[in-house]
Amino acid sequence: MSSKEKLVITAAITGSRIMREKAPYIPYTPEEIVQSSMECWRAGASIAHIHVRDPKTGFGTQEIELFQRVVTPLREKTDLVLCLTTSGIPGRNLPYEQRLAPLDLRPELASFDAGSINLGDGVFNNPPDFLDAAARTMKEKGVKPEIEVFDSGMLVTALRMRDDGKLSDPLHLQFVLGTPWGASATPKTLLYLYELMPIDATWSVTGIGKGHLAMSMMGLIMGGHIRVGMEDTIYYDQGILAQSNAQFVERIARISHEYGREIASPRETREILKLRRL
Ligand code: ZN
């Protein structure tokens, strides 16, 4: 992979865990999520990583109608690659069918959390039978798994599933580093994970909280791709709340431009990640 391959920027718009009391600008309603995704698209993001929230309570939900209210306008108004979550609400462990429901909307990508991990006071449950069901359903529906890796064992799990024929090459990995319970957001951790990856895999990285920008820079220079957004950090800089997701995308586009790495359009992103044609 050339280090000057075009850069795929993913915008992780809202997640399902951070509430407005802490993050006053975080999108909640489908309309707000659409609006924010469009701003990110205009700023250079080619993938929108989508969770939805109950507009009244703000809690994450896997309600298919809410996903529909985000997916339909984004498909009409943009050429964004959509990555829908199958996490549900990490730590609250919704039934499998609810977690996999967004796959009915046939997104080009969907998150695939490749193992269980502690989260807050609980466990984010991704046992083998869930992973098998998720991999099978994604294959049936032509959805490419975006394999989320919070810790090295999750990459080992994904590689095992690939060897067993449950996941197909080329894998696309999303490293999510710096959660308080998983692998740390350091260059050394990322280099270790990088060395475990199959040669033809594509990968993207995000740092949670204060590792956010540092991990972006690692992704930039190592030839990977970058995920940014309020799902992963609500601060633009130390102690300064981000007022929009687009701010994060704009910053990466600016730095990448200076560095000499062009930003991939959604069409180019489909080629880089070998996505099916819509
Ligand atoms: Zn997510």
Image (tube, rainbow, N blue to C red):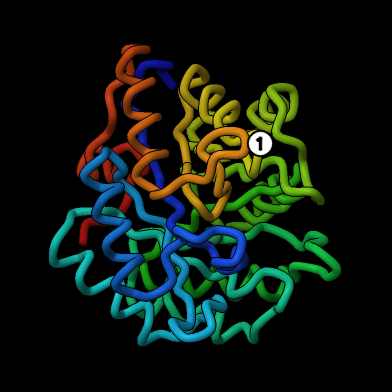
Mark 1 belongs to which amino acid?
Answer: Lys
Rendered view: 11 above or below 85: above
Residue 112 or 33: which is nearer the viewer? 33
Q: Is residue 276 left or right of residue 249?
A: left
Q: Secondary structure at mark 1?
A: helix
For residue 205, which quarter of the picture? top right
Image quadrant holding the N terminus, namely: top left
For the residue pair 192 and 247, the one nearer the viewer reads as: 247
Q: Is mark 1 within 8 Å of ligand 1?
A: no
Most extreme residue toward the left is 76
Q: Is residue 50 above or below residue 92?
A: above
User: In the rendered image of this protein, does residue 232 appear above or below residue 34?
Assistant: above
Nearer to the camera, 222 or 138: 222
Q: Residue at x 43, y 82 (%)?
A: 55
Residue for badge 1? 210
Numbered circles on residues, count:
1
Where residue 137 appears, as percent x and y from the top left, is: 49, 75
In the rendered structure, the answer to whether residue 256 lies left or right of residue 57 reads left
Residue 251, horizontal then vertical, whole percent: 38, 30
Choose top left, top right, bottom left or bottom right for residue 268.
top left
Q: At 69% from the left edge and 45% from the top edge, which residue is drawn?
A: 155
Residue 117 visible in this rendered orientation of the protein: yes
Residue at 56 percent of width and 86 percent of height: 97
Relative to 229, is 134 on the left or the right?
Answer: right
- The residue furthest right is 121
Splitting the image into 4 quarters, where does residue 263 fall?
Answer: top left
The image shows residue 179 at horizontal and vertical percentages of: 73, 48
Quarter of the render that holds ligand 1: bottom right
Residue 111 visible in the current orientation = no
